[in-house]
Image (tube, helix red, strand yellow):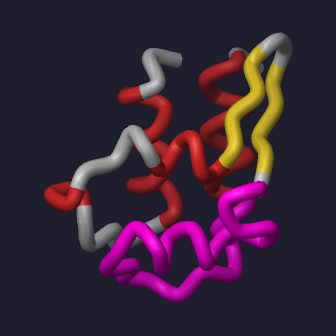
């Protein structure tokens, strides 16, 4: 599995228990198991939910699914 796919999978997994739609950045961070400190790792790449959240803009919300969140984050991170 590529780094991109692994990070994507971990984001989706981290949001498995989230209730969608998620309307705000704060609500998104709260949806991760360890909040902003939730960490995804693959190979030499490590990113926290807090760092990933900085890649998002107000226009990205609301998110309708964990897959949508992961798609936007991995694209913006250039993975």
Residue at image location 44% in from the left, 83% down from the top:
20
Q: Quadrant of residue 78?
A: top left
In the image: residue 61, left or right of residue 32 = left
Residue at image location 82% in from the left, 12% down from the top:
44
Q: Relative to residue 52, is residue 63 depicted above or below?
A: below
Q: Residue extending furthest top?
A: 44
Q: Relative to residue 8, is residue 33 depicted above or below?
A: below
Residue 62: within the magenta?
A: no
Whole-percent x, y for residue 61 in the image: 25, 66
Count of numbered circles in the view: 0
Indicate the quadrant containing the N terminus: top left, top right, bottom left or bottom right. top right
User: Is 54 in front, or is 31?
Assistant: 54
In the image: residue 54, left or right of residue 32 = left
Q: Quadrant of residue 36?
A: bottom right
In the image: residue 47, left or right of residue 50 = right
Whole-percent x, y for residue 73 in the image: 45, 39
Whole-percent x, y for residue 8 in the image: 61, 39
User: Is 2 in front, or is 48?
Assistant: 48
Whole-percent x, y for residue 37 in the image: 76, 56
Tell me where the magenta segment starts and ends, as one range: 14-37
Q: Relative to residue 16, is residue 76 depicted above or below?
A: above
Q: Quadrant of residue 29?
A: bottom right
């Amino acid at each position: 599995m590529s780094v991109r796919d692994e990070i994507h999978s971990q984001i989706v997994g981290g949001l498995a228990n989230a209730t969608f739609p998620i309307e705000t950045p704060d609500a998104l961070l709260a949806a991760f198991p360890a909040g902003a400190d939730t960490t995804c790792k693959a190979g030499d790449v490590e990113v926290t939910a807090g760092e990933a959240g900085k890649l998002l803009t107000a226009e990205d919300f609301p998110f309708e699914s964990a897959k949508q969140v992961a798609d936007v984050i991995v694209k913006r991170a250039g993975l």
